[in-house]
Image (tube, rainbow, N blue to C red):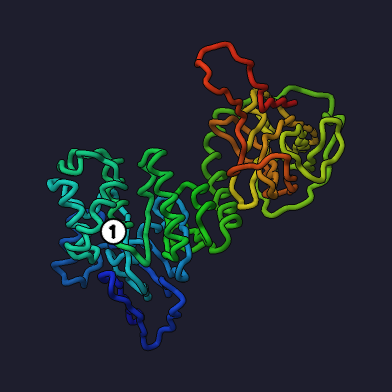
Amino acid sequence: MTPHRHFRISLLPPHHHSDFRYTGLSFSTVNAVEFQSVSKSYAIYDSPGDRLKELLSLNRARCHKDFLALDQVTFEVKRGETFCIVGENGSGKSTALQIIAGILQPSRGAAIVNGRVSALLELGAGFNPEFSGRDNVYLNGSILGLTTRQIDQRYQDIENFAEIGDFINQPVKTYSSGMVVRLAFAVAISVDPEILLVDEALAVGDIYFRQRCMRKVHELRQRGVTILFVSHAVADVKAIGDRVMWLDKGRLIEIGEPDRVISKYMATMVEKDSTYRLRKTAGVELPSTAGPSRAPEIADTIPNIDHRYGDARAEIIGIAVLTGDGAPLSMLAPSSRIVVRISVRAKAEVAMPIVGFMLRNQLGMDFSGTNTSREGYDLAPMRAGDICTVDFHVDLPELYPASFSFSPAVADGTLLGYQMCDWIDNALALQMSRGDNEIYGYIHLPCHVEVNARLGSPVAEPAPLLEKHSG
């Protein structure tokens, strides 16, 4: 039997609050959003005639197939939490947000939302293209529960944040996609939401506006606003997410810490996306050798493995961070030269090997990375048993004192298309020591100062900051 459906959305004026109770359902008031075995199905017809046949038979004749956009999804979002959702296109991310926003109702299960919801889902959804931007501000504000007086009080802030100039008085149909999302985001954050839904809307914005929006998201987090954020930009997800949910074909794959979930998600995407790209290089013949080659110096230890993935045709056998003279390092120092040594072993033929690493900061953000192909060094093809050691000579800039981790990788292909052979998350971590000078922000950029100087006059050239060698 189909279970009894319980569903309610709170979309109330700012002075209202809600606290739901359901018979037979346990809903914690700590949670802003809760899904209990939620499924959403759509009827798919092969032709319009099949839909008509079903209607004429009063639904006794089944002429459709059910497509499950969400399949028994259960999760909760705590008050004040930034909850991110990742997954391929068609995985059910937008459907979940539309259910939370009240646009859709679940086919089965219970979706419970406790708080004022403001949604930025589809680009310009709710905007009348014939109305001016100003008229749409008042229209959307009223839909979101604001009175005309409240919109009057906030209008100037909305206009200032959108920064679309005189276009605010022009019909929305004359706007670019970026201008539409600017205005839509400005309105969405103006209602003082308790729950903010953002679905890939910022992807169309320019870099300047995206940075402003991300700063605003951080500000809302600090104010305790619950945020549900859908994005393919994993760097943004890692930067703001408290937890991440991974959906695939409507099913919940995993929920947890951003680093762990994103690593597994990206591993799956890389494997899926890169397979077909190697078909052009499948016929590359490897040169004949007398036997397996072996590097003169080998890193043979992997201090830590948080997560590992790849097709295993080649494997990382060791990573080390050394001084220029080859001595092991126990701590990084600002403005110093280090050698990142990575040794790999081929377990099968690897036609176009690429070796590289990713440097992450203590927040798990991908801080910087490189690889042999990026540095213009083409490695020789490898046969089973071959061992290759690559040394990356890196001049570190002045970085703030924190922990940094190195994630080594080996792949087969080119930068345009490759198959991941082995990737190890956070294989080695080192602390950055404190330098002689203050670091404002994350990194100190190379700089020289002139006072009352005329531009274009001959000046001493500053020393280059970074010089990389691969081999």
Residue 54: image x %, image y %? Answer: 19, 66
Q: Residue furthest top?
A: 458
Q: Is residue 327 left or right of residue 236?
A: right
Occupied quadrant, residue 348:
top right
Q: Is residue 134 left or right of residue 341?
A: left
Residue 351: image x %, image y %? Answer: 67, 29
| Foreground of the two, 215 or 407 | 215
Residue 463: image x %, image y %? Answer: 67, 22
The correct choice, above or below, for 64 with respect to 181 in the image is: below
Q: Quadrant of the N terminus?
A: bottom left
Q: Is residue 79 visible?
A: yes
Categorize mark 1 by other alpha carbons within 10 Å: few (<14), some (14-19), many (20+): few
Q: Residue at x 25, y 70 (%)?
A: 13
Residue 112: image x %, image y %? Answer: 37, 74
Q: Residue at x 28, y 52 (%)?
A: 157
Q: Is residue 274 left or right of residue 23?
A: right
Write down the residue under mark 1: 44
Label 1 element class: strand
Q: Is residue 311 visible?
A: no
Occupied quadrant, residue 31:
bottom left
Q: Residue at x 15, y 61 (%)?
A: 52
Q: Quadrant of the C terminus?
A: top right
Occupied quadrant, residue 271:
top right
Amino acid type indicated by mark 1: Ile
The correct choice, above or below, for 443 with respect to 154 in the image is: above
